[in-house]
Amino acid sequence: MIAKTLIAAAAVATLATAVSAPANAKVNVDLYVGGFDPGYYEPSYPVYDAPRRPRYNDYDYEPAPVYQRYGISCEEGRDYVRDSGFRKVRAINCGGKRFTYKARRDGNPYIVRVSRRNGEIISVQPAY
């Protein structure tokens, strides 16, 4: 009878330790995989990276457009005259505030003046 009591007490004790062991178990596993620094830590404050300056060899880099200070170029004025229905447009004078072109429309020669500031046609006069 004492033997049965001792066996029962041992079984209860084993069962009690088996049940309570997983509740108190704290598992700490450190695993190191090559290439990662185990001493790396995340800072508790936010870190802001400065924007990267674009380089000329970057594919997404586009230089800022260059705006002319004094309006359109002589070639752009010639294109405006050509788009207005004139053909055989030649530049006569591309200096100053107005550009002057010699052009033809319907076989007749004309002198066309274009504003350098905005590209508007100022005057159209027949050339004799």
Image (cartoon, rainbow, N blue to C red):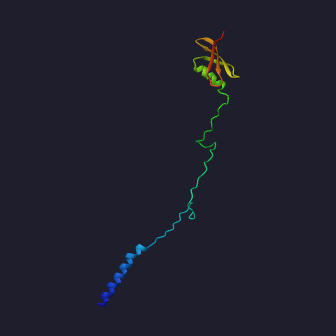
Figure label count? 0
Quadrant of the image occupied by residue 123: top right
Q: Nearer the viewer, residue 47 or 89?
A: 47
Residue found at x 39% / y 79%: 17
Quadrant of the rendering where the N terminus is positioned: bottom left
Q: Is residue 66 left or right of residue 14?
A: right
- The percent position of residue 51, horizontal first and vertical second, equals 60, 48
Q: Quadrant of residue 98?
A: top right
Q: Return the residue found at the far bottom.
A: 2
Q: Position of residue 58 (x, y in %)?
A: 60, 43
Q: Residue at x 65, y 22 (%)?
A: 115
Can you say which quadrant of the picture contains the C terminus? top right
Give the x, y percent position of residue 30.
Answer: 51, 68
What is the x, y in percent for residue 33?
Answer: 53, 63
Q: Residue furthest right?
A: 95
Residue farthest left in this picture = 1
Q: Nearer the viewer, residue 113 or 6?
A: 113
| Residue closest to the far top | 128
Task: Indicate whether 61 appears above or below 121.
Answer: below
